[in-house]
Structure formats: structure tokens, C-alpha cells
Image (cartoon, coloured by chain):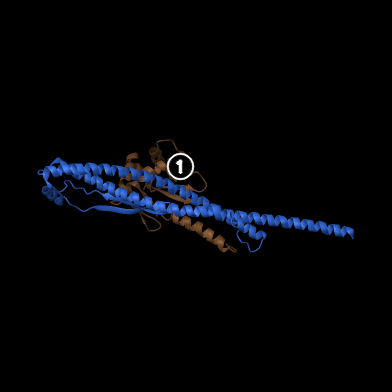
Amino acid sequence: MSQLIKVTRPTKIELIKLRRRLTLASKIQKLIKDRVSILVMEFLQIAGQTVEVKRGLLDDFSALYKALSLAAGYHGYIALEKEFTASEGGLEIAAGLRNIGGVKIPAFELKKTKQALRGYSLIDTSSWLDRTAELSEKCLEAIVELAELQRSMAKLGMEINRTKRIVNALEYLIIPGLQATIKYLNMKFEERDREEKSRLKRVKVLLERK
Amino acid sequence: MSGELPYDRVLREYLTGELRVLNAHLPGKQKSLADLWDEEYPHVLCNDGSVHLFKQKELRYLASLIDSDEQKALMLPILIEVNTGRGEMAVLCPGVVGEKVIQKVLDMPLDVRGERITLYRPQLALVRKRLKTTTQYVFSAQL
């Protein structure tokens, strides 16, 4: 049940103020509802993408382990480790922000280093090692993308929760409360009018009797 | 407003604050696709001081849709206006290049009124899916 807002005096001015307040509250509600719908749409899109990227990443990981096992079998662990140590390099990730309906979410992009060679000797190594390196680069890109998507999803989810609470407060508490108070005031004024009319009639009767 | 009750003020300030938060990310200045193309880290500075980063992949996709002259005319990020109480959104893009881009992204004819392209929700979802960092929302409400 909606709660009545306490009005200091049941006057017309108070009624006008309440009506204005109701219009404002309705506008806020519309705005926040629009925001929630946008956030939910984005959240669902990001959730779908997360599933896709995660599935792709798992497939790539599985292919990578296979390629790595074959490379290890072909070269031996010691030789493979030596080649990998030679090909070690730093990563560069461009990090920024993007904003969806007031929610700041991260944007990462793995910068591709323009290297002609991966660092290991092409003569001493097999194509299995190339395949391993290629797949691991692909996995790295997917990991960065997944990190961005998962963080975005968490942040959007939190914001949706918070905003929904505000929408519910407006929808089920503030607006019905204002409407009920306006209705109460209207009834009060009607009652006052009726009282006034009956009083006038009574006065008229008394005057006629005299 | 004189004679305003604290309750009214709270509501009004909340709405203004909400609009400020929603629109704080708007870019101080839009950049053309050609300019962004030359930058190592394509970005624009937002009104709240944050950096909005564009993804190279999306820029490449946009560049593939239009020719080099049009790349100079396409201002990014493309702004999508969300008007409260209406089921549709509007893409604010002066010029024909923006219209051409959105048309190619959606692969369907568009409802263009003046400098606004009207988008419906399913269309918006498609545009946002393809152009995540190159589009931004603008929320508008009449106080």
C-alpha cells in the first residue's frame, strides 16, 4: 500500500506543488527506465559476446596444447625452452575507457608488434613451433578481449541492479505516494466545497424563516 | 525556483545529476575518421576528462565502408540520442556520410528527418554490436 506524504496544510498551493513534483518524478522515472533498457540491451550483447569469445578461447587452448605437445615431442623440452626464451618479448596493451549510459567500462586493445620474426631460429625449428606461437598469440588476444568483456559485464550488472532499485522506488513508492496525496487533497477540497454549499443552503433557509 | 520545497529540489537535482552523469562522457570535440586513422592510439577527450579509446578493428571496418574523401567528413564518435518516453533513438549525424555508414551497417533503408536518422531498438542493437567504441549515447530529457 502506498504511503501518504505528509502535507503541512491542505491548500491549493500545496496541490499545485504536489502536481509539479509528480510530473518531475514521472520524468525521472522515464529517463531511468530508458537508461535501464539501454544497459540491459548492452549487458545481453556483452554476455553473448563473452560466451562466444570464451568458447573460441577454449577451442584455441585445446589446439594450442596439442600443437605444443607435438612441438615438445619433436624438439624435446630443453630445446623448446631455449627457443621460447629467445622469443620472449614485452606486451603492449592500450587501455582506455568507454561509457555506456553513465557506466565507465574498460576498453583494452593488444598492440601488435610489427616483428618480422618471432625471435627463434627458423632453420632449427619445425612448423609445429610456428603453429604453437601463432596459436598462443591468438589466445593472448582472446584473453585480453575476454578480460574486457567480463569486467564490462560485472560493471553493467552492478549498475543495472542499482538503477532498478531506484526505478522500483519511484514506481512503487514515490509516484503512488504522490498520486495518493493528490487524490486525498482533491477529495478534501471537494468535501470542503460540499460543506460550504450545505452551509450556504442552511443560511439561506434560516434567512427565509426570518 | 523560489518557494521550492527541499523535496522538489532533491528530485530536480537528482534528475539534473542523472543527466550530468549520463552525458559526462560526451566528447569535447569529435574527430574525423581520417585524423583518427593517423593516431597511434585513436582516442578523444571527454568532457569529464576521461579518454575514450577507439578500437582499430572498428576504424578499419568503418574505413572499408567509405572512400578516403568521406573519411575526412565522418566525425567520430557518432552520437545516438536517446529521447525519454519514445521507443526510438536518433542518430545525430550532419551530412550524408554518417547516413551512408549507418545504412551500410544496417543494410536497409533508413528513416532520415533533417540531420537525424531514426533508429528502432533492434536496429540500435545491431549498430552498437558493430560499432561499440565509435558510437556514444546522448540522453536528453526536457526538465
For residue A147, side relative to residue B106 (left or right):
left
Instruction: Residue A189 in the image: state x and y as whole percent.
Output: 70, 57
Quadrant (top left, top right, bottom left, bottom right) of the N terminus of chain B: bottom right
Q: How many marks?
A: 1
Instruction: Residue A29 in the image: state x and y as whole percent.
Output: 52, 52
Q: Is residue B131 visible to us here?
A: no
Residue type at the position of mark 1: Arg
Residue at coordinates 84% horizontally, 57% vertically from top-left? A204
The brown-coloured chain is labelled B
For residue A123, side relative to residue B37 (left or right):
left
Q: Outermost residue toward the left? A: A124
Q: Secondary structure at mark 1?
A: helix
- Residue B28's quadrant in the figure? bottom left
For residue B76, side relative to residue A118 (left or right):
right
Towards the viewer: B82 or A19 = A19
The blue-coloured chain is labelled A
Instruction: Residue A6 in the image: state x and y as whole percent.
Output: 61, 61
Q: Outermost residue toward the right? A: A210
Residue beneath disc 1: B121
Towards the viewer: A22 or A43 = A43
